[in-house]
Amino acid sequence: MSEDLILEIKNLSVSFKDRKKTINVIRGVDLSLIRGKTLAIVGESGSGKSVTVKSVMALNTKGAIIDSGEILYNHKNPDGTTETIDLTELSAKQIIKNINGQKIAMVFQDPLAILNPTMTIGKQITEGMRLHRKISRKDAKQEAIKLLTHVGINEPELRMKQYPHQLSGGMRQRVVIAIALSCNPDVLICDEPTTALDVTIQAKILELIKNIQRERGLSVIYITHDLGVVASVADYVAVMYAGKVIEKGTAEDVFFRPAHPYTWGLFLSVPNVDKKEDELYSIPGNPPDLSEPIKGDAFAVRNENALPIDYEEEPPIFKLSKTHYVASWLYDPKQNAKVEIPEILRKRISDMETGVGSWIL
Amino acid sequence: MDIVNGKQDSLLKVEGLKQYFGKGKSLVKAVDDVSFEIKKGQIYGLVGESGSGKTTVGRSIIRIYDPTGGSIRFKGTEITGKLDKEKKQLITSGIQMIFQDPMASLNPSKKVFDIIAQGVDIHHLASSDAERKDMVYEMMEEVGLNPSYADRYPRQFSGGQRQRIAIARTVILKPDLIIADEPISALDVSIQAQIINLLKQLQQKYGTTILFIAHDLSMVRYLSDVVGVMNHGHIVETGDTEEVFNNPKDQYTIDLLEAIPRMNPRRTEI
Ligand SMILES: Nc1ncnc2c1ncn2[C@@H]1O[C@H](COP(=O)(O)OP(=O)(O)OP(=O)(O)O)[C@@H](O)[C@H]1O
Ligand SMILES: Nc1ncnc2c1ncn2[C@@H]1O[C@H](COP(=O)(O)OP(=O)(O)OP(=O)(O)O)[C@@H](O)[C@H]1O
Ligand SMILES: [Mg+2]
Ligand SMILES: [Mg+2]
């Protein structure tokens, strides 16, 4: 492939040892990020989105074991040459020293867990800048105030002197975004970056990141449950279920031609507020327990259209187009299965295509 | 049952609530003269700008803070000012809050089972060990957590799974008033739907009253009977949900509704 990939996750498997049991949390994930583009990862809560991206930065909690796979970071040097680093071969220390912040920066899902409760906001933003970029205290402070303003925080001077608990949930989230942006990274990984933000500030943050992307060719991975956000920022979308990527493609592939029954269920769960339904649709059943071996397709038991082979054998990836891939037996020519997108979903998609529909409101 | 439009009892009445932090140059008027009322069995959606004071309103009601001014009446009893034993009891047995930062509110050294059972034990809600177990397992199923995870610790869960632990341990107590602060923002849409259905069931089955703080306006519209919109410590608009969504009056409300990202890759351009 001639595409300019900045990050390639290849056949990644991660497990946790829990006393006697082994929990296979990531079961062979393949994902790549094109330089300067945006990839959104969506999927079931607990499907492994956070663990996947934390593996990139060797940030998983103790007990996480990378069973297989590589994570290649293709760094472009100022002289134009490219250098490939397998991040799984670096120690956590090396990553913190050489990668974290300046090359790849991450915004975590739980801002309280990242912010130091005993350190002022100002100190926490300027620390990395001063360490990595060797700038003076005064310049770092100026820049921190500018960054806080960019992420929509009023009275930045006051906030710099405050501690995390004195800020609202959404302010803390924006502080974490400001820290991630403070060292001008090549790759920005955002795990649920806007869940605690109201939609006006959310739009502002997404716009800020888009602008940086235009100016500096920043490459971005978003993990988010908000499909409206995905639709507005993503070039590519990957859908995860039970430790695997079960569908991936361009945003148009996934929104207009969703192929996996799990993706259908996910889209069907978005409330249609024009009609007041008595009950919202949600996918029946629970995700599998990953400490038990999984036979066949992990989604089969929740899929009313499951084929006999779904209970027997794990589906490989089928290629639907140059950009669109799906892991489901439905697309195996040998199965001769009829692919039928649920009627309501088909209607919503055609409304979207003609431009009138937006599903929400 | 007409729980929405009837002239039923007021469960919570907040009048002129003020909650200030700090003093002098660093004074923050987090909540400044906020008034609203929730009738018994109603779901009140509180939305608004990040930092506008929504969480503070919730925390003042359960008296994590000492309100700077104003009045809060719960079931007809004033609960601002000095709390005697009776008032404390009224608050702890009648009101439960689901907190915005789930990890910070879960004891890391306790197993999930015990976290969910904690309130059951405190309020003596189970008459036997078997009943206690059943209650916890059933609750785990209802929030979409595999009961086989009961022996794990909070750090072994994903963000959304932790959120559901926090929901389970609150809902299991069936309090009169639930204050749910961003209870669904960390969840995928299918599980969001499951939790929203669960909250609605609680309202319908047990007449539970809910103060629902959220950013997702489509879910707020779906779930709430009444909404209030906050900006800079004030409620700038409040009223019947459909009325506010169809006919917003305040400029901030209008901006908010317009900023909702549309789920259509062809229509949205940031
Ligand atoms: N330290 C750990 N020990 C054991 N299991 C873990 C640990 N950390 C995560 N897991 C499990 O790994 C799975 C994937 O977790 P992950 O945090 O990646 O999910 P996620 O897709 O980010 O979900 P969410 O949308 O809820 O944040 C979950 O089932 C979780 O229970
Ligand atoms: N303990 C505290 N000490 C000082 N200031 C505080 C404290 N708690 C909240 N504040 C301030 O009060 C204001 C309102 O915060 P609050 O957490 O109520 O906002 P919110 O509406 O819940 O926002 P979000 O949607 O971001 O969670 C903010 O300016 C915040 O910094
Ligand atoms: Mg996560
Ligand atoms: Mg809040």
Image (spheres, helix red, strand yellow):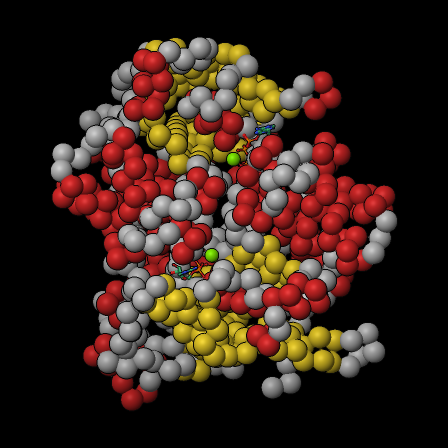
Q: Quadrant of the C terminus of chain A?
A: top left
- Residue ID at (30%, 71%): A298
Q: Where residue B111 sits: x, y (%)?
A: 33, 48
Above or below, A270 against B4 in this view is below
Residue visible at 57% across and 40% down? A170
Q: Which of the 4 quarters of the picture holds residue A319?
A: bottom left
In depth, the one of A128 and A195 nearer the eye is A128
- Please provide percent x and percent y for residue B80: 44, 13
Q: How many numbered discs, if any? A: 0
Task: Point out residue A301 in the picture as x, y percentages from the top left corner.
Answer: 24, 67
In the image, residue A25 sits, relative to residue A229, either above or below, namely: below
**Lateral position of residue B7 relative to residue A69, left or right:** left
Side of B141 where A355 appears, left or right:
right
Q: Quadrant of residue A232?
A: bottom right
- Classify residue B269 by image quadrant: bottom right
Q: Nearer the viewer, residue A195 or B264?
A: A195
For residue A62, say whether it is visible: yes
* Above-or-below relation of B148 to B206: below
Residue A314 percent coordinates (x, y)? 32, 80
Please name whichever residue, B184 or A127, is drawn nearer the observer in this view of the structure. A127
Whether residue A244 is visible to the viewer of this picture, yes or no, is no
Q: Residue at x 40, y 82 (%)?
A: A318
Ligand 2 picture quarter: top right
Which residue is the extreme one toward the bottom? A334
Taking the spot 80% from the left edge, 79% from the top edge, the residue there is A80
Q: Looking at the figure, which quarter contains the N terminus of chain A?
A: bottom right
